[in-house]
Amino acid sequence: MDGWLNEVQRRPVLYIFCSSLAFRLLQTLLKFLPRPHIVSRDPWKSYKWKNLSVSLVHSLLTGTWAIFCVFQYPVMVYELYSSFTPVSYLLIVVSTGYFIQDAVDIIVSGYARESWEFLLHHGVVIWTFLYAVLTSHYVAGAVVALFVEVNSVFLHSRLMFKMAEVAKDSHLYTINKFLNVSTYISFRLGAQFYLTWYILVNYSWLDHAGYFLASMMLMNIMILVYFYRLLRADFFSKRSQSNGIRKFAQD
């Protein structure tokens, strides 16, 4: 196993590139799956559906993978800077490839303006994960950060339900709504705030702590704003008002 890890660590950029290609291939294959008619007839919704489908697969894969890594080697939760396993290192390589592919796809598809929130998020994640992969530091921190993907499964599903115009009072939407908010608090907010706390407590000796703290603060602001929008739309509003504005991260 160590020999295999050394091979990946010697050529991390190559394996990240292979991961990006794999997710690109997945995106191509998902085009052949049926989708709601209301989505197919709108180019913007059709693109969003395709993009979210790939994101959903990534979330299912990496969210489960991240939890497995922590169960396999629990010390990673306490030693976010230096501890990791070959499986957890590969997880960050694979996830980095996904985020690069997704960012490039958004830009090339011509929807960068509508998806600026996603691009900002991806930019922070890519540089942070690349640092972890290239230096082998903060790998465990990146694994804990991927706990948010457990929530992303329900967050992406919610957006797809809205595009397919699934009724907000339907059982399917209601179940997903409560799973979404509960995992948002536990896996997304919990993971983000734990990482922020860890950096603050160990700031004096962590490498490039200032950069990582600034990145975490930016991410914290983003997820709190989106959490407010989520609660407003699903729990405190009778109807969504988009005013015809095309936006990837809609309420």
Image: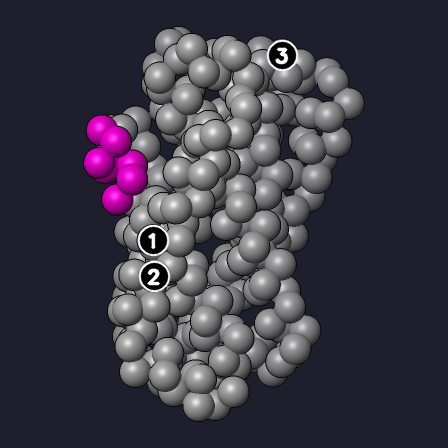
**Figure quadrant of residue 212:** bottom left
| Residue drawn 68% across the image and 73% down it | 71
Closer to the camera in the image, 23 or 250: 23
Could you tell me which residue is drawn at 48 percent across and 67 percent down? Answer: 91
The amino acid type of the residue labelled 2 equals: Cys
- What residue is at 45 percent from the left and 71 percent from the top? 90
How far is the residue under mark 1 from the one under mark 2? 5 Å
**Residue pointed to by mark 3:** 238
Choose top left, top right, bottom left or bottom right for residue 135: bottom left
Identity of the amino acid at label 1? Leu
Nearer-N-terminus badge (3/1): 1
Q: Decide: marks 2, 3 in contact (CB < 8 A)?
A: no
Tag shown at residue 21: 1
Q: Which label's residue is closer to the chain start, 2 or 3?
A: 2
Residue, far right: 171
Secondary structure of the magenta portion, mostly? Answer: helix
Q: Amino acid at mark 3?
A: Lys
Magenta stretch in the rendered image: 104-110
Residue 110 versus residue 88 in the image, above or below: above
